[in-house]
Amino acid sequence: MRGILYFTIISGFFACAFFQYDLGPFSIFPFRIFLIVLWLFFMIRLLFFHERLDASQIKVKRYLLFLGIWLSYAIFSLFWADFRIDALRYIGFLLMGSSLIFFAVLYFNKLKDLRCLYFSWIIVSIPLMGIGFWEVFTKNHLPNSTFFGTTCLEPSSVFGHSNDFATFLSLSIPFVWAWMRYGEGKWLKWIFGIILLAMSFFLLAKTFSRANFLAVALEIGFIFFFLFHLRRRIKIGFLVGLIIVLFSIFSLRIPLRISHCAYGFFKGFTDPSTSTYASTIERINVIKNSLYLFVTHLGFGVGAGNIEKHIAHFAKYPTYGATNPHNWWIEILADYGILIFAGYLLFYLGLIYNLGKIWHKINKRQEKMICEALLISLIGFFLASISPSSIMASEYQWIFLAFVLAFLNYFRLKSTSSL
């Protein structure tokens, strides 16, 4: 079961980029096939080999309970959802994501499993970034990309759109950082780590994903203000200030260019003459429509996966063709209502709070490495998740949450056994 789960996760990183077969409203590809095989083997072991599910090994029951409630509510929303095909699709996505989390918690309960998953994430990111570089330098794209057949320079790798790739990079950067900080080896990890970080930042810049720029800035700020001691913050601040002064003395072009880019970045949000401003106005109106529809449905939500079609048919504010909220938090609120939104918010904040407590307790370098990477990525997730059109169907999001809950479960199991 553990071996099949590894294959499921590895195939999930590549999503539907390869070996995809359309089956009407759904498509089938390796990740989903492996997930079905997981369920089949699991049920066979329970029914025919009389194996018992040891609930005592699951220490994150409240988190799993919320996922079960969310899934049940999504199914119940079929009674009022106007577009039931879309609702069924999103129920399927939620079922697959919750299943992956359940199996990860059940079978990844040893440090060696988590360590293997950690380095699998880093290793898999290398070919994914390689595809991104191929797109940038050849202007070609994979068939599942929205840019396929165009000469667009924005890389989307295997994810279909550059915003999804940017979110994956935002979640991956802390993995490389924590490996450089706590991993084994002196020079090798720093050489490869710096190369991987440089590749990640280059590709992230090419995606032009503003939300993910801010997400990475939030991650860096969190590292600086919450994970570094005061002495280190002073040293880093002094070093950065010295570098800026030296650049200003020997070459004014670099600081001027940086300030010009920063000015252009924020100007795009407020200047009506820019395309960035127009896209921002569209997104604001889509969010306003989402909140309007949320209120008109008395806070119960429009139904699983229905918000996009509702905006297309019942919008109050002009969106100029844009229908997707492009905001994971608003999507949950509009689709599933206030109760599920509040539950998800507690789910997310609870993970951050618990990982923060664990980070202060543990001393083992490998545990510290995994905990810090997951904690920083969770912080960045708040903004990174608003970049893609929707991350409900994004396998890497569910893999990430599965990793977080598996680590939390591992630590609680370890703490219980040591008492």
Image (tube, rainbow, N blue to C red):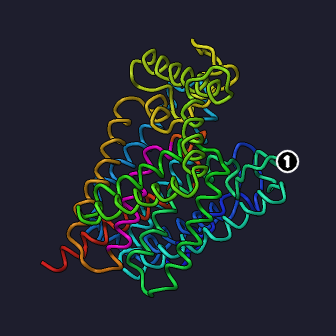
| Magenta highlight on residue 382 | yes
Q: Nearer the viewer, residue 386 or 254?
A: 254
- Which of the image's four quarters has the C terminus? bottom left
Residue ID at (35%, 63%): 236
**353 horizontally vs 159: left or right:** left
Question: Which residues are drawn in magenta?
Answer: 368-385
Estimate the x, y position of residue 173 in percent, counting from the top left.
50, 62
Residue ID at (59%, 15%): 315
Query: Is any atom of residue 396 visible in this view?
Result: no
| Residue on which the image places disc 1 | 151
Q: Which residue extends farthest top?
A: 316
Residue ID at (39%, 49%): 67
Disc 1 element: loop
Q: Which amino acid does the dot numbered 1 rest on?
A: Thr
Estimate the x, y position of residue 336 in percent, counting from the top left.
44, 32
Q: Residues within 10 Å of mark 1 (few under 14, many from 20)?
A: few
Task: Quadrant for residue 8, please give it.
Answer: bottom right
